[in-house]
Image (tube, rainbow, N blue to C red):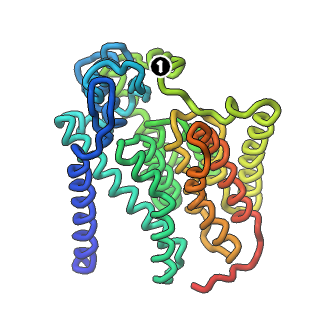
Amino acid sequence: MKSEKRPLLFAQLFLLLVCILAMAWLWDRWMLEGPHGPYRWVGMDFAPFWVGVREMFHGANPYGPETTLKIQQVVYGGPALGEDPMMFVYPAWLFLIIAPFSLLPYQWAAILYIGILLWAMLNFLYQLALALGRKNFLAQSLWLVWILLGGLPFLVISVTKGQLGYLSLLALFGAHSLWKKRPVMAGMILGLALIKPTVTVIPVAVFLLWVLLEKNWKFLAGFAGLMAVLLSASLLAVGNWFPGYFGMLGIKGGMSAFWSLEILPTPWNILYAVLFIGLGAFSFYSSRKRKNTGWFSAAVLMGIALTPMRWMYDLFLGILVLTEKKEYSLSQTVAAAIAVLSPWVLIFFPEADRWNAAVIGIPLIWALTWFVLFTNNEVNTLES
C-alpha cells in the first residue's frame, strides 16, 4: 500500500514545486505602473495580512493608519496616492494561520504562500473533474480542461495576487466533504472559512444550523475549539480588535465594495434578495424533509449574492454548487458546463459595466444551474 502511494506523493510534491517556481519566475516579470514607479502584481493582496500579522507580533494595531502606510510601502513603495489603499480589512483571528509566513521575508513569504494556494486550488479543480467525470477517464480529462478554462480568470487574476478568500473556498469544500466521516476535523476546517468572512458568513451559519439539527456534537465541538484557539491567540496578540475591525469595514472610499443590493435599483434589489433567500429556505426545507442535497450549495449562493465584496474574486465560490451533486443527467451536465465557462461572457461587456454585471449576473447563472441540478428529476442518462 505504501509503495502505491509513493508515486502520488512524488507527483504532488513535483506539482507544488512547479507552482512555487512559477510564482518565483513571475515575481519580477509581472509589473504594474503605480504612484511611485512599477510595483508587483504577484503577492499584492498578500501584503496586507503579511504586514498586519507582523505588526500583531509587536502588539501593534493592524487596523491603524501606521499599519496601512506600511502595507502601502510594501506594495507601492510609498503612500497609495489614489490607488487601492491596501488596508488590513480582515478579522485578526487569522493571526495563527499567517504567522508562519510572516516570519519570512516578504518576497519568499508571498511566493511560498501563493505557490501553496495555487497547488491547493489545482488539486480542488482536479478532484471536481474526477467527480464530474464519474470514473470515465475521457470524461474526467474533458472536465478538467473545461474547469481549468473556466477557472483561468480567477486563477490568473486573483490567486497570483494571494487572495485570502480562496482559503475560505477550500475550507467550505473540505468541511462539506468530511463532515459525515470525520466530524471533528470537518468542524475545525469550517472555522477556517471565516478567516475572510465576507461571503462565507452565510454558508457557515447555515452549515452550523444544519449540523445542530443533526445533533452532530463532534462537528460543533471541532468548530468551537478551533475558533476558541484563533480568537484567544488574536486577543493575546493585540487585545480587543473588534472595534478596529468593524470600523475598518465601515470606511467609505478607497477600494469600492460591490454589492448587488446597492447596484440594482428598487424594486429589483428586493426581488433579487427574495430570490436567493427563497432559494436558501426552499433548499434547506426540502433537504431536511426528503434527505436530499442542495442546501449547502444554496447557502453558498446566498453568500455570494447577498453580501458585499471588494471585487469579483469571491464569485468563484459558485463552483461549489457542482461539488454537492453526485450524478448528472445530460441536461444537467450541459447546464453545469455553461455555468463553469460563464465568466468569459464578461469580455463582451464594456469595462465600466463589467464588474457590476459579474456581481449580479454570475450568482444568477449559478442559481439557475442549481435549479436544473437539484429540482430536475430526469433519470440520469450519462454512462459511467
Q: Amino acid at mark 1?
A: Met
For label 1, the residue is: 248
Point 74% across, 38% down: residue:
273
* Secondary structure found at label 1: helix
Is residue 303 in sight in this rendering?
Answer: no
Q: Tell me if 17 is positioned left or right of 320 in this view.
A: left
User: Which residue is situated farthest in the bottom direction here?
Assistant: 383
Q: Tell me if 275 is positioned left or right of 311 in this view.
A: right
Point 55% across, 35% down: residue:
309
Q: Tell me if 299 is positioned left or right of 266 in this view.
A: left
User: Which residue is situated farthest in the left direction here?
Assistant: 105
Residue 334 placement (x, y as % from top left): 65, 71
Q: Is residue 220 above or below residue 133?
A: above
Residue 177 placement (x, y as % from top left): 50, 60
Q: Is residue 326 above or below residue 51?
A: below
Q: Is residue 335 above or below residue 172?
A: below
Q: Residues within 10 Å of mark 1 (few under 14, many from 20)?
A: some
Which quadrant does the N terminus fall into?
Answer: bottom left
Point 32% across, 22% down: residue:
236
Point 36% across, 42% down: residue:
161
Residue 56 placement (x, y as % from top left): 28, 23
Is residue 168 in sight in this rendering?
Answer: yes
Residue 308 falls in which quadrant of the image?
Answer: top right
Residue 238 falls in which quadrant of the image?
Answer: top left
